[in-house]
Image (cartoon, rainbow, N blue to C red):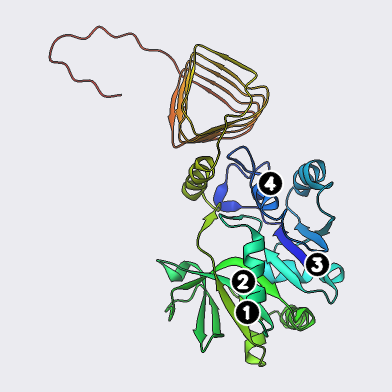
Amino acid sequence: MKVIIPAAGAGKRLFPHTFTKPKPMVYIAGKPIIGHILDRMKDVEFEEIIMVVGYRKEAIMSYVDKNYSSIFRIKYVDQLEQLGLGHSIYAARDEIGDSDIMIALGDMIFKAGYSEFYRHHLDNGDCSGSIGVREVDDPKKYGIVEVDDKYIKKLEEKPARPRSNLGIAGIYFIKETPVLLSILKEMIKKDRRTRGEYQLTDALQEMVNRGYRLKTFPVSSWYDCGHQESLLETNRVLLDEKKDIDPIYQMKDSVIIQPVAIGDNVTIINSVIGPHTSIASDSYIESSIISDSVIGSRSHISKVNLQRSIVGDDASVHGKHNSLNIGDSSSIEF
């Protein structure tokens, strides 16, 4: 089995943080998103990882090669145009060959490890593939599946009138890989797009139409890193799983409130950090209170109170102290 990680998109919903880096390289809970994904694959036996890259690909390739090349066999495939998930899978066709594949999205972090999902897939027995699903509150925002007698009977991407609340969780196992690639080739040749993209959901539906049997398996929880609010929520959840404080280069007259993730060579002076705060390497924090926030690398933060904030790499945030002389029965709001 080979693992396909589509990681070529620009991540426009996370602008401005993805102006200078691809979405999988956005930092949360001590490392980039792609690091959390790969950590959860360490206990799965597979042939290799095929990472589909495009937008600012050098950042992903450099980080992954430095931190994971000794653990996994990794190949990179360029998706020259970002034309959807189905298109990204087809871009990797030469590397995929006839192998069974697991598709894991490059912006979804799961609480469970991928080995659990693989066991669910194996337990499904005789089928052409398995798709992870979870009940969702607003099915119009997701790819949705309908199940009949254990098998999937319909898949639809963001339906206007959903007939199910089973959302596709972003993890797929495919046995009949040549069939899927043939369908994607046909979709691209005939320019069959949905909302301007070649959807993997549409290709899987065509497999069902042709009589191939797909099953589902449950995904208890996923962490979507696609926009600011969900990114901060994911940061909170992942930090709650941490046990120890990370190394700090220098800390003076400061308080750390766990859970936090603090990178190497970080200086913290006269500040309160946490809870649920991630600070990347080489940053300088002074005279500040920071909670429920993510601070990028080489940032300089001083004299501010930050809550539920995301600060990018090489950023400077400076406030100023106020001096007050307040009389009786006063009320002041800043």
> Measured from the top left, where is residue 329 in percent x and y?
12, 15
Front of the two marks 1 and 4: 1
Between the C-alphas of marks 4 and 3, the distance is: 21 Å
Tell me the crowding category of disc 2: few under 14, some 14 to 19, or many 20 or more residues within 10 angstroms, Cα based: some
Residue 68 versus residue 51: which sits nearer the camera? 68
Q: So how many labels did they put on this image? A: 4
- Circle 3 sits on which residue? 92
Specify which label sits upstream in the sequence, 3 or 1. Answer: 3
Can I make out residue 84 in this image? no
- What amino acid is at disc 4? Gly
Between the C-alphas of marks 2 and 4, the distance is: 24 Å
Locate the N terminus by quadrant. Answer: bottom right
The correct choice, above or below, for 65 with respect to 209 in the image is above
The correct choice, above or below, for 74 with respect to 125 in the image is above
- What amino acid is at disc 1? Asn
Between the C-alphas of marks 3 and 1, the distance is: 26 Å
Q: Are marks 2 and 1 in contact (CB under 8 Å)?
A: yes
Relative to 210, is 272 on the left or the right?
left
Residue 209 versus residue 12: which sits nearer the camera? 209
> Measured from the top left, where is residue 270 in percent x and y?
49, 13
- Circle 2 sits on which residue? 120
- Circle 1 sits on which residue? 124
What secondary structure is found at the residue carrying circle 2? helix
